[in-house]
Image (cartoon, grey):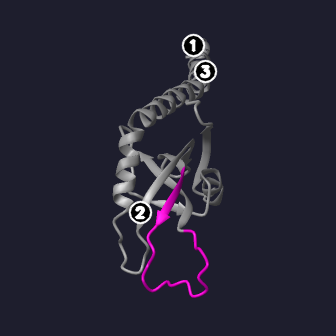
Amino acid sequence: MVEYWWVFLAAILLLVFLVWAWFPVCAGIARMRFAEARRDFHHQRERLEAKFVQLGMVSTRPEASRWIDCDFEDEVAYARNRTTGELSAFVAVTLEMEDLPDRSNVAGDAVSNLRAATAVFRFDGRHWETEGRAIFNLTPTEAIRHYQRDLELLAQEAPGRP
């Protein structure tokens, strides 16, 4: 057994090399999956926006304002959930809100019904979905920064450059 010590040493060195080589392989696979998810988001974006508007226009509470219209910006920010690894896309939107009858403007001033928000889209590993969730008063980057304990920013796309 003593004369075969080099076999054990070679096995240990091989194991160390395989572990060392595994991390770049995993990182490469993750980058490829992320690039594919981004492409899928752009291919499905029109459907996702329509579903977001459809779900968002349904009022869940009687006292809440309903959306009348939604305008999407081109810029997209991608983030990953630190715990689950779930990928999300955040898109800036401007929502036009419906006036509620009990909110009267006594002074007669013009009140803007436009609200800045961020639309949230989630990737389940196969396709993108939305629940019609909007994060009000935050840009996509600010929303990710606000939830930085849960989310890590992966990438941002400027308008016209996927």
The answer to whether residue 146 is above or below residue 130 is: below
Local SS, label 2: strand
Q: Which residues are magenta?
A: 92-112
Local SS, label 1: helix
Q: Which comes before the other along the chain, label 2 or label 1? A: 1
Circles 3, 2 touching at the beta carbon (< 8 Å): no
The answer to whether residue 76 is above or below residue 51 is: above
Tell me the residue at 43%/76% (across/down): 64
Q: Amino acid at mark 3?
A: Phe
Mark 3, Cα crowd under 10 Å, few <14 / some 14-19 / many 20+, is: few
Mark 1, Cα crowd under 10 Å, few <14 / some 14-19 / many 20+, is: few
Tell me the residue at 42%/64% (across/down): 67
Q: Mark 3 = which residue? A: 17
| Camera-side mark, 2 or 1 | 2
| Camera-side mark, 3 or 2 | 2
Q: Main secondary structure of the magenta part?
A: loop
CA distance for labels 1 and 3: 20 Å
Q: Position of residue 72 (x, y in %)?
A: 50, 48
**Disc number placed over residue 68 in the picture, else none:** 2
Which image quarter is the N terminus in? top right
CA distance for labels 3 and 2: 59 Å
Q: Mark 1 = which residue? A: 4
Which image quarter is the C terminus in? top right
Residue 160 part of the magenta-drawn span: no
Q: Amino acid at mark 1?
A: Tyr
**Quadrant in the picture for residue 21:** top right
